[in-house]
Image: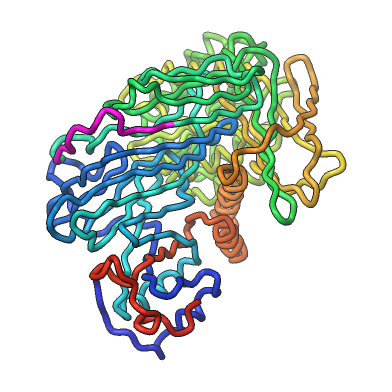
Amino acid sequence: MERGSFSPAAEPALSDLVPPQSLPARDEELWIIEKAAPKGLPAPAADAGGLAPGSGMLLNVRGAQLTPFPLEHTDVRADIRGCIASVSVRQRFANPSHEAADATYVFPLPQNAAVTEFVMTIGRRHIRGIVRERGEAEQIYRQARGLGFLALLMVQDGPDVFFQRVANIEPGRQIDVDICYFHAVPCRDGWFEFNFPLIAGPRGSGWPKAGQRGGRDVELAVHIDTGTPIERVESPSHVLMLTAAADKTTSDVTLAPADRIANADFVLRYKFADGPIRPSLFMEPDGDGGTFSLFLPPPGASAGLPRRPLEMVFAIDSGTDTAGVLPIVRALRGLKPEDTFQIIHGSGSSPRSMTGGAVTATAENTARYADALARLRSTGAGTGEILRAALAAPHEDGRLRIVCLVTDGRSNAREALAASAEALGGARIVTIGVGRDPDKGVIEAIARMGRGPAVYPPIGEDPAATMADLIERLSRPALTDIAIASKGADISEVFPRRIPDLISGRAVLVTGRYRSAPPAALTVRGTTASGPREWTVSPGAGAPAGRSPVASVWARMKIADLASQAAYRPDPRLADEIKQVALDHGLLSRYTAVICVDSLSGPSAPDEVRPASAHPLAGGLK
């Protein structure tokens, strides 16, 4: 624990930094959560390659050594609505040593997960997180540290690992860790796949091994509510007990009693029944109205959908090397004679069309330009100029226009984001991330604005299968030009602003706000192969109390939209709005951190609470 000097005149008082309802109670200690890389965390071995936990782990930190505390029990409760999972985890550890210990809790998060709650219980100590503005949290941290508080730092390291440091765990103590998070359930080849890490111990070589755990140390329950019939639910890793509703739109999953040994990660897969498009609607009311999420499940195999002629415009970033054009070569070979294509790349200071305009995708043309691409050396023009040129190219009526941007995301990214926001028209943008270190944030933001997917072909492998599958799916959309409306209700702030097409293997999720009374139904409009279609969608049953992620998903999507705007449109109001949304919904962001409160003022007397007058921050706290 760090202690330092603190001058009350140097900074505002703690009570001036946060409103009373966010201040700790008397006899509490302050902790801070910040989204930053962990500092000073020792690696267990030189060849471990960094921290890679198998499941949630509490690691005893002694100098340069990390020793896992025994994990006695794991309890998992997951609620999946459509394709969004809200997960609550409780893990019980023990400190069997005869001395106090400093530790780090590490939990591997799914991609793009957001932690919404963290509570650690050690005897009578309770540590809970409260989101505050980052600057305020840092000031509180400095004050608490200077006054001698147990002021520690919790960090979320990137999108996939969560860290929490905790000091002075008394010998023989039981430690309960409760963590809640939500994330999108990925869809692969028509199957949604929910994963939860259960293997005790870290991944990779060089780590100390956690001991074998008992045979009945895991409790796991998953509730799936999709609003549309589920064809199959299965697990390749565990034996399940299933209870499905009569209409097959909901299913409850638990582990079979004989299969609760945590010797394999839990994998749950579910798939929707083939058939017509069936949108489903979920609502979460609040004081001013509420939030809704509209879920369109992915259609079945693309082969069952009519093919539409494509107009492919390949835009090649000037920083793309010879290996980077290989995806385009493979994409050209996946086109049909009824398609057209053109290739735009950097030449000198301006973009240039290699093909001189759109050409038909005959075998002769695709072979000719595939050979030319192998010799291409793009220079000069950056991503933004090339993308604008591709979007400005004359459009052919009757074809589905796809602009395929090949980039590492590191050249003129601001202009590229502006181009996708301002000049999209009727096109869709597919971003192909190339290079060994592409800027995925930029690549995915461009795709999101362009209502298309972001694709990362495997490095060092032939991308033929990846590109052939991409062209097949894009050419056979189930629904395009999607829009939503409501009669008799005021809906607003709908995200994504540009709704992507519904294609095979890719669900569509739309969120928004409604005012006052919830809408009785939403209208979904779009274009199918047979022409315009319309659906009226009524909301399904409510989510279990306190478990619905609908509002958090909306807030996360709004923050992503605002962040994309801020990347190409300098406006200080955008940062303020991001911060406010994060604070209102308890989410970490670039501008927020989390204050944690420990229910005791010090670990030296864990079963006693000091009188309020003895607490260093007693004055003014409520």
Measured along the vertical axis of the image, is residue 146 above or below residue 455?
below
**Residue 72 located left or right of residue 275:** left
Residue 82 placed where, x, y %?
Answer: 59, 30
**Residue 11 quadrant:** bottom left
Q: Is residue 388 visible?
A: no
Measured along the vertical axis of the image, is residue 611 above or below residue 199?
below
Residue 210 colored magenta? Answer: yes
Farthest residue in the front direction? Answer: 607
- Residue ID at (51%, 74%): 18
Q: Magenta stretch: give its range.
A: 208-220
Question: What count of labels does the image hold?
Answer: 0
**Residue 326 located left or right of residue 301:** left
Q: Quadrant of the N terminus?
A: bottom left
Residue 441 placed where, x, y %?
Answer: 46, 45
- Residue ID at (50%, 45%): 349
| 414 or 346: nearer the viewer | 414
